């Protein structure tokens, strides 16, 4: 089979073997969870419960009136113990609700639906909004907003992102393998909302088992249906293949202009995890209260893929998944390329956590910056045609007159340039400084 | 458990191919040519290579210490410069001139411009250019292979150019059994080294291809027009310093363009200038000047060939 890809990027050591064969396992809910009120990009939520309130599983605890927001629901039944600020994995401190789990697992009445695909588009969008679904690939942008296409735009293609290009992470791979038909059903719903002509699911070729499983199921569905078929496309294993613009570039050979979105070129990209969450919400009426997370790295006794209740603290989750066999020296939430290091094991798992990587002391990679030798590896690797070495020189020597020609703001901070630099120059940080300077001008 | 975690921004993983490793790759790639030099020019070759390498490393350390910079001889870049400088010297060169050449290469060309990565010109080539200007007689005295006596013989390029001798010994050109600079004579050894660098992705293929391709096209056409005056494409590729220049000098990352389009222009420019000098200039060989001239316009090429903005 012929694989598709984008220009630039590089193949990274995958490290996926640690968890790729580990079946998704649900972890028991802990005695106490700390649920950040806002776990999305957009307007912050306000709490709609008070201290002492009794909660059921699926009960809404935080919401906002703004359109760009996503409500948060309780994953356990129990009592509200505190409403305070607590630190989280990505954005410092934010308001959070502490819930004491009573272990009874009493749920609100979930609205089960037999044939949600017959519902009108607006109804489906409302279901997604009420379930608090956000981009599960880590971006956490509210999904209902992404699916609410402005009238003047026309969308012809839905691309489903199963690339999972970050090393170590395997939760999307396992989800595609174990929840194959559920994901395909979710994809159909999204396609229905968008009214697209093409549905394409892109997967990197290192996830052959997922490709086979989906291909088999999709063929069944496509055969017995008069609706538009779901195509599955094999992509080259190359970072950052899972970036929205790279993915749609690889599949459709369209380029998203600077500052524009995929919808400006007629495309919506959704992650496979998001499609699964949409299935759960539409068919079973379940709001987003848990997600699949990869825990991996040599310090772990039992690396694996786990379904974790949102708000469960990392410390509790690791303990119940098997604990450490050696002390971790670095904790990364997300992938090893774009992930965020953590200074505490007390952070709660939230909607945007795809995986947590633990590195031992001997695996730490610390390099000293040496002079740039102009090897141009950063220029060759950049998936958005930037010249990181020139941006670095502009920042270092204050040659700001070069700013309009170097387009630093196009950078999506994938980190490929810094990965490949033989001189260990922190190019992403130089580019961030350039972006800051650009902002100051405006 | 101690809960002191290491905090850093991403990415958290890095390539293993760091600068000293790239330099090591270049040194490994030069080994076949070093053996060829030692085989054809015996002790003279070994002494020249050793003296050049040691003096380059010593000058680098001395000047860095003097300028109160960090001494970075462990990055091996001075070793590469030293070996390359020796490789483009005639075997009969007096030792003291090579030391002077090393001083120009490391001191003037590299450290005064700011050290590794900041030089405009290829250090080894500018070192040789200085010696060529200051001591032209030493730089144009050639040994025949296997002889230790300096004879004022001619290189194959000189023979063709000034003697119109079209009896070309292609076997000698390929293996290295001709007179010339230490490391430039054996095409075979250089091609092995070039293949290694390409496989290791230490150099980009565009510059050597554009350079050698341009030389081939021009020599093929001129040979077709006037076969009695101009030699053919194969001769121009194998003779003189083209291969060592195209594989080891023009590909120097510091002094060649960072864009792909720029590398094409750079290679073609090198080929054009080389052939103008070889065919119509006063010297038999033009590789050194062609690369130095293209080094000078590299910043301009970088500006003129910026990649197209994504999505426009």
Image (tube, coloured by chain):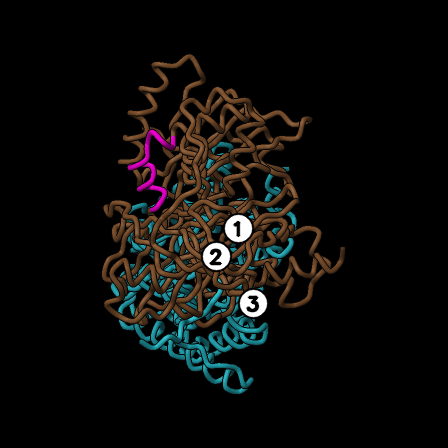
Chain colours: A brown, B cyan
Snapshot quadrant of residue A316: bottom left
Snapshot quadrant of residue A234: top left
Q: Earlier in the sequence, mark 2 or mark 1?
A: 2
Of A208 and B246, the residue lying toward us:
A208
* Residue A276 as seen in the image, left or right of residue A417: left
Magenta stretch, residue numbers: A171-183
- At horizontal 65% and vertical 54% (from top left) the residue drawn is B300
In the rendered picture of this protein, how many numbered marks are placed on residues? 3
**Disc 2 to disc 1: CB gap under 8 Å:** yes
The percent position of residue A69, horizontal first and vertical second, equals: 60, 45
Q: Main secondary structure of the magenta part?
A: helix
Circle on res. A35: 2
The percent position of residue B67, horizontal first and vertical second, equals: 56, 84
- SS at badge 2: strand
| In the image, residue B77 above or below residue A147 | below
The percent position of residue B244, horizontal first and vertical second, equals: 40, 56
């Amino acid at each position: 089979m012929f694989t598709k890809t984008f220009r630039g990027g590089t193949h990274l050591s995958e490290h996926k073997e640690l968890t790729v064969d580990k079946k998704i396992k649900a972890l028991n809910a802990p005695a106490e969870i700390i649920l950040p009120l806002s776990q999305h990009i957009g307007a912050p939520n306000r709490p709609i419960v008070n201290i002492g309130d009794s909660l059921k599983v699926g009960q809404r605890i935080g919401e906002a009136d703004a359109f760009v927001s996503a409500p948060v629901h309780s994953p356990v039944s129990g009592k509200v113990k505190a409403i305070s600020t607590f630190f989280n994995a990505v954005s410092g401190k934010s308001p959070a609700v502490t819930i004491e789990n009573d272990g009874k697992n009493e749920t609100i009445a979930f609205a089960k639906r037999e044939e949600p695909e017959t519902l009108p588009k607006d109804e489906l969008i409302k279901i997604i909004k009420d379930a608090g679904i956000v981009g599960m690939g880590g971006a956490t942008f509210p999904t209902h907003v992404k699916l609410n296409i402005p009238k003047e735009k026309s969308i012809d293609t839905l691309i489903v992102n199963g690339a999972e290009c970050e090393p170590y992470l395997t939760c999307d791979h396992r989800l595609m393998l174990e929840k194959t038909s559920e994901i395909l059903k979710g994809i159909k719903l999204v396609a229905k909302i968008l009214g697209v002509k093409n549905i394409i699911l892109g997967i990197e070729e290192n996830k052959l088992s997922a490709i086979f499983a989906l291909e088999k199921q999709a063929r069944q569905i496509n055969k017995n249906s008069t609706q538009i078929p779901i195509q599955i496309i094999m992509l080259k294993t190359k970072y950052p293949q899972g970036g929205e613009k790279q993915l749609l570039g690889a599949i459709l050979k369209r380029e998203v202009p600077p500052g524009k979105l995929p919808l400006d070129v007629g495309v919506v990209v959704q992650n496979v995890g998001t499609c699964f969450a949409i299935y759960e919400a539409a068919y079973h009426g379940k709001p987003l209260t848990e997600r699949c997370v990869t825990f991996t790295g040599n310090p772990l006794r039992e690396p694996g893929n786990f379904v974790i209740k949102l708000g469960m603290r990392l410390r509790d989750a690791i303990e119940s998944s098997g604990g450490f066999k050696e002390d971790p020296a670095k904790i990364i939430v997300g992938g090893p390329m774009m992930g965020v290091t953590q200074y505490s094991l007390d952070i709660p798992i939230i909607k945007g956590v795809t995986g947590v990587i633990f590195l031992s002391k001997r695996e730490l990679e610390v390099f000293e910056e040496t002079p740039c030798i102009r090897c141009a590896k950063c220029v060759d690797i950049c998936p958005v045609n930037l010249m990181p070495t020139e941006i670095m020189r502009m920042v270092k020597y204050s040659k700001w007159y070069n700013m309009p020609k170097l387009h630093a703001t196009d950078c999506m901070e994938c980190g490929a340039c810094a990965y490949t630099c033989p001189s260990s120059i922190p190019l992403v940080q130089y580019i961030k400084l350039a972006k800051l300077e650009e902002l100051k001008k405006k | 458990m101690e809960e002191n975690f290491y905090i850093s921004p991403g990415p958290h993983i890095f390539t293993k191919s760091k600068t000293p490793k790239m330099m090591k790759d270049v040194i490994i790639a030069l080994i076949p040519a070093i053996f060829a030099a030692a085989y054809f020019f015996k002790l003279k070759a070994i002494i020249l290579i050793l003296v050049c390498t040691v003096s380059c490393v010593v000058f680098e350390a001395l000047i860095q210490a003097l300028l109160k910079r960090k001494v970075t001889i462990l990055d091996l870049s001075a070793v590469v410069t030293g070996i390359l400088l020796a490789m483009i010297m005639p075997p009969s060169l007096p030792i003291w001139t090579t030391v002077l050449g090393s001083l120009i290469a490391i001191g003037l060309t590299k450290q005064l411009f700011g050290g590794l990565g900041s030089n405009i010109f290829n250090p080894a080539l500018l070192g040789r250019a200085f010696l060529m200007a200051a001591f032209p007689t030493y730089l144009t005295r050639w040994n025949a292979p296997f002889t230790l006596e300096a004879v004022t013989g001619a290189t194959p390029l000189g023979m063709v150019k000034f003697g119109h001798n079209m009896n070309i010994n292609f076997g000698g050109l390929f293996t290295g059994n001709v007179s010339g600079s230490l490391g430039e004579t054996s095409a075979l050894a250089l091609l092995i080294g070039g293949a290694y660098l390409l496989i290791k992705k230490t150099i980009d293929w565009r510059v050597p291809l554009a350079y050698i391709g341009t030389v081939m096209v021009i020599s093929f056409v001129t040979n077709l027009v006037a076969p009695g005056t101009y030699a053919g494409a194969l001769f121009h590729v194998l003779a003189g310093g083209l291969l060592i220049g195209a594989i080891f000098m023009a590909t120097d990352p510091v002094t060649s363009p960072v864009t792909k389009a720029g590398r094409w222009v750079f290679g073609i420019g090198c080929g054009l200038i080389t052939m103008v000098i070889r065919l119509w200039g006063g010297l038999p060989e033009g590789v050194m000047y062609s690369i130095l001239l293209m080094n000078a316009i590299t910043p301009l090429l970088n500006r003129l060939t910026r990649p197209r903005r994504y999505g426009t």
